[in-house]
Image: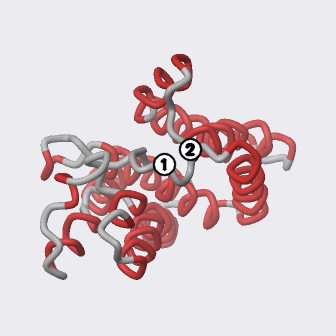
Amino acid sequence: MTPILLTIALVGGYLLGSIPFGVLLSRWFGLGDVRNIGSGNIGATNVLRTGRKDLALATLVLDGGKSAAAFVLASQFLHPYMGLVAAVSALLGHCYPVWLGFKGGKGVATFFGGVFVALWPLGIVCALIWLVTAALIRISSVAALLSVNSAPAIALALGRPDIAMFCGLMALIVSIRHWSNIMRMMQGTEPRFGDKKK
């Protein structure tokens, strides 16, 4: 590993992650700027509020694909461990895209994309944690925070301390992006599935 490879992984991952698919798809299909509706977020949940489930699904897949693609490309063409670096950088790009004034998404889909390609059993366990928590509590942010912050411990249990560190960095970024949600949780005002606003 050299400084040049590290720089390529960081910059390449960030630029890939910073592509605002939710904003682009909404505009291309004549729905306006998704940042002007609902929570103002650029992710799939807010795209869903336009009434276009197909575009929301496309946004979910493409946002997840950012870190997945960054991981695979950097691992193949730079160095195996550069994949982890590029995936974390892609998450940063998604959450803080330079093109949108560093105001991006919450990073959950991008987190899962990176985790699934890095260690698919871990991705499955984290996804199950999200699904069960969401079904029981019906609060998306609680499910997201629980699943992403469980990932480092699960990776360690699977014998992958390198992946645990990778997940820890990603979980920290996602948690920071959910700060407003955490504040609403503490106040008991965080909305549940089915509420008009999230």
Rendered residue at 31%/46% (across/down): 39
- Position of residue 88 in the picture relative to residue 121 (left or right): left
Mark number displayed over residue 195: 1
Query: Between 122 and 109, which is closer to the camera in this rendering?
Result: 109
| Residue type (three-letter) at the residue carrying disc 2 | Arg
- Inter-mark Cα distance, 1 to 2: 6 Å
Is the Cβ of the residue at disc 1 closer than 8 Å to that at disc 2? yes
Q: Quadrant of the C terminus?
A: top left
Q: Position of residue 127 (x, y in %)?
A: 70, 58
* Left or right: residue 81 compared with residue 10: right
Residue 111 visible at all: yes
Neighbor class of circle 1 (other Cα within 10 Å; few <14, some 14-19, many 20+) is: few
Residue 175 as seen in the image, left or right of residue 133: left
Q: Residue at x 17, y 73 (%)?
A: 31
Helix, strand or loop at mark 2: loop
Q: Which residue is mark 2?
A: 192
Q: Residue at x 43, y 26 (%)?
A: 179
Query: Residue 113, how many percent across, how many down?
Result: 54, 63
The percent position of residue 61, horizontal first and vertical second, equals 46, 73
* Quarter occupied by residue 54: bottom left
Say above or below: 6 vs 127: above
Above or below, 113 relative to 101: below
| Dot 2 crowding, Cα within 10 Å, few <14, some 14–19, many 20+ | some
Tell me the kind of residue under disc 1.
Asp
Residue at image point 57% right, 58% down? 112
Residue 122 spot, x, y in % from top left: 75, 56
Residue 156, quarter of picture: top right
